[in-house]
Image: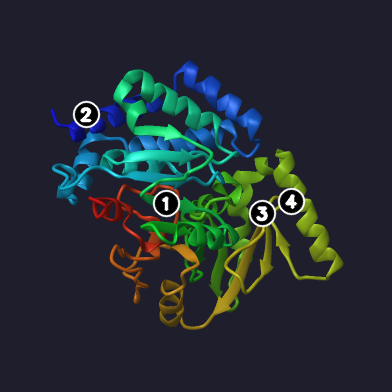
Amino acid sequence: MSLLDERIALMVRLGKYLADNSEDWQNVVDQAHRMNAWFTPEYSRLAVGNIAAAFLQEDKLRAWLAGYPVLQHPLAPAKTVGLVMAGNIPLVGFHDFLCVYLSGHRLRIKLSSKDTVLWEHILRLLGNWDPRFGEQVDTNEMLKGCDAYIATGSNNSARYFEQYFQKYPHIIRKNRTSVAVLDGTETREQLDSLAQDVCTYFGLGCRNVTKLYVPEGYPFETLLPAFDAFKEHEDHHKYKNNYDFQLAIYLLNKVQYMSSGSLLLVPGDSPFAPIAVLHYEYYTDKSVLLATLAADDRLQCITLKAAVALPAERQSGAFAVPAVESRAFGDNQQPQLNDYADGIDTMAFLASLY
């Protein structure tokens, strides 16, 4: 068995552990919720379930890694890769972790202060199962002396990352969000799926839809009931505080708005929206709109009734993949192994370091 085979086996074992949802893991999830109120047990289980099903199945891992043959027989010694993780949703940096670990490079992780409990448990568990894991992967607050870097953060932090890591091979990710394009013929089932793309994880992820594009005269009364499935968000104190604050601002400024009771729909030019807010804008020509959106480097996903071939792709250099994903309603939060953030093939980048 090669070293890559052993790494794959360890990840498959982790997938089975996460899927089993043992009492031990449930206690960790509860502890993570106490530490970060946004990490509700429901959403932590959802994130972990998606990771186990989409990322940690042996057949999927082998099919994915077959596209990077240099990883089976590296042509040079492994490098040390520094990884700065985000913490907006549970285990949001797992794909980056998986890429670096399976690539065989040494990994130094700076965890987000918002997501330490889940990660520390997983890393400790992997180290107990395989002593060599601890030789390859560790955590550190300072990521000095690495050969390459992958960092995810806000637009502001990205400027600092660019400055600090400019002399090294790097991937720097900025703020991203997702939008949806409707045509008014959606079924109730499709609108219910769209509501998942909007509301899951309280709307905090880059794959969450934060803006709708609708035709003139769109019947919002058919859309608003779809958000009733997430009315429990009203009982979440942090979410409710954001909803109340935004509502007060709109009332004071006499801004037009609609409300489902737990979500505010307001006109807005920006694809980004505050927590508890969904922007919308009218369009006239769908094909022109899709071409414009496909070239927008602020977007991760464009969500429609059915995924389409986008009319344009923004390229991102030597490791480019389609920069904006086309997704069917309800699919945003189920990325696969070959779905890369920001239009950069992370594994190809890592393979190039050999």
Q: Nearer the viewer, mark 2 or mark 3?
A: 2
Residues under numbered marks 4 and 3 in contact, where contact means CB atoms less than 8 Å apart: yes
- Which circle's residue, 4 or 2, is located before the other in the chain? 2
Question: Where is mark 4, residue-wise?
Answer: 242
Let me know if residue 268 appears in the view.
yes
| Amino acid at the residue labelled 3 | Ile
Which label belongs to residue 256?
none
> For the residues marked 4 and 2, what is the alpha-carbon distance in whole angstroms?
46 Å
The residue carrying pointer 3 sits among few (fewer than 14), some (14 to 19) or many (20 or more) residues within 10 Å by Cα, namely many
Q: Nearer the viewer, residue 77 or 110?
A: 77
Question: Where is mark 2, residue-wise?
Answer: 6
Which label belongs to residue 275?
3
**Helix or strand or loop: what does disc 4 sit on?**
helix
Q: Nearer the viewer, mark 4 or mark 1?
A: 1
Question: Where is mark 1, residue-wise?
Answer: 150
Counting from the top left corner in percent of width and height, residue 37 is at 66, 36
The residue carrying pointer 4 sits among few (fewer than 14), some (14 to 19) or many (20 or more) residues within 10 Å by Cα, namely some
| Amino acid at the residue labelled 1 | Ile
Can you say whether 67 is above or below 49 in the image? below
| Amino acid at the residue labelled 2 | Glu
- Which circle's residue, 1 or 2, is located before the other in the chain? 2
| Extreme-top residue of the structure | 23
> For the residues marked 1 and 3, what is the alpha-carbon distance in whole angstroms?
27 Å
